[in-house]
């Protein structure tokens, strides 16, 4: 007489409470994603600095909050820049001296960050490394050298200047060679609906002085104004090296307004 296998107990049916708990979690994740997307689109978006074009104001490894509402909204305010509409809504024009993020005009996708120095109708020219606005040089004074520790650990001393725009807005710039390729330019007349943007590191910035590179920035391409630096790292410790994080973080640059 052969033994019969023992009958297996039926698997317990999924209870309504478990199903409701699963969908509750899914709905929570969806709402969290929508809220995060809304904040990113309408309020603030984080950016990090990958290049030295905005030295001494911004260093490689700085992380910023960019206010999306400062200039109103365009299609570039949204993720992937969908062509839903043209121009800007609730527009507030930028001011000279603003540090702004914009989409590179020649591809409408790459994020650039520069300082707005020219408004529509302005005449902009560089002469001997000095910015001229409507034919007049802006005030520029030599200050102490900017000391910068490169990622390779070398200490550099760079010539630093304080520039002051006609409205009193003041900021620091670097200029290593008054006769560099971008220190003497033709006069540019900023067309309507466009802006002229320059990097604070005047000899190491691809900006509106290079028509084939950046050129004039259309108002539609503005993403937002850089308002607050919330984190900064010198890059000496990677994400998988937590023991090096304390020494890599630039604590003195955290939660600083951007001027």
Image (tube, helix red, strand yellow):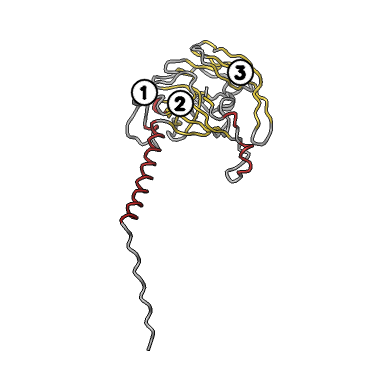
Q: Secondary structure at mark 1?
A: loop
Residue 225, numbered circle = 2
Answer left or right for 226 relative to 139: left
Mark toward the start of the polypeptide (3 vs 2): 3
Residue 146 coordinates in the image, percent (x, y): 64, 23
Badge nearest the viewer, 3 or 2 = 2
Q: Residue furthest left?
A: 16
Residue that badge 3 annotates:
161
Residue 126 coordinates in the image, percent (x, y): 55, 17
Residue that badge 1 annotates:
91
Q: Secondary structure at mark 2?
A: strand
Q: Quadrant of residue 54?
A: top right
Q: Residue furthest bottom?
A: 1
The reply to whether residue 80 is in sight is no
Other-residue count near label 3 (Cα within 10 Å), few / some / many at <14 / 14–19 / ≥20: many
Structural distance between the alpha carbons of marks 1 and 3: 33 Å
Identified at 33% across, 60% down, the residue is 14
Answer left or right for 252 relative to 78: right
Q: Quadrant of residue 139?
A: top right
In contact (CB < 8 Å): disc 1 and disc 3 = no
Other-residue count near label 1 (Cα within 10 Å), few / some / many at <14 / 14–19 / ≥20: some
Mark toward the start of the polypeptide (1 vs 2): 1
Identified at 52% across, 34% down, the residue is 48
Between 135 and 254, the residue placed more toward the observer is 254
């Amino acid at each position: 007489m052969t033994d019969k296998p023992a009958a297996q107990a039926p698997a317990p049916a999924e209870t309504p409470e478990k199903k409701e708990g699963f969908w509750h979690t899914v709905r929570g994740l969806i709402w969290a994603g929508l809220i995060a997307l809304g904040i990113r689109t309408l309020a603030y978006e984080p950016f990090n600095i990958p290049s030295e074009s905005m030295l001494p104001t911004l260093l490689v490894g700085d992380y910023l909050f960019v206010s999306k509402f400062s200039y109103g909204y365009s299609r570039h305010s949204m993720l992937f820049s969908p062509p839903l509409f043209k121009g800007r809504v609730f527009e507030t024009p930028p001011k000279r001296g603003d540090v702004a993020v914009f989409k590179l005009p020649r591809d409408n996708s790459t994020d650039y960050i520069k300082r707005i120095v020219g408004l529509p109708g302005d005449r902009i020219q560089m002469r001997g490394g000095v910015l001229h606005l409507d034919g007049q040089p802006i005030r520029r004074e030599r200050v102490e050298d900017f000391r910068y520790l490169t990622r390779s650990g070398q200490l550099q001393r760079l010539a630093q200047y304080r520039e002051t725009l006609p409205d009193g807005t003041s900021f620091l710039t670097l200029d290593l060679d008054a006769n560099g390729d971008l220190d003497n330019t033709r006069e540019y007349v900023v067309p309507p609906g466009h802006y002229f943007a320059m990097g604070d590191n005047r000899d190491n910035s691809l900006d509106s002085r290079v028509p084939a590179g950046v050129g004039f920035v259309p108002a539609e391409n503005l993403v937002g104004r850089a308002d607050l630096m919330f984190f900064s790292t010198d890059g000496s410790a990677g994400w998988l090296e937590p023991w090096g994080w304390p020494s890599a973080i630039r604590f003195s640059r955290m939660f600083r307004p951007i001027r």
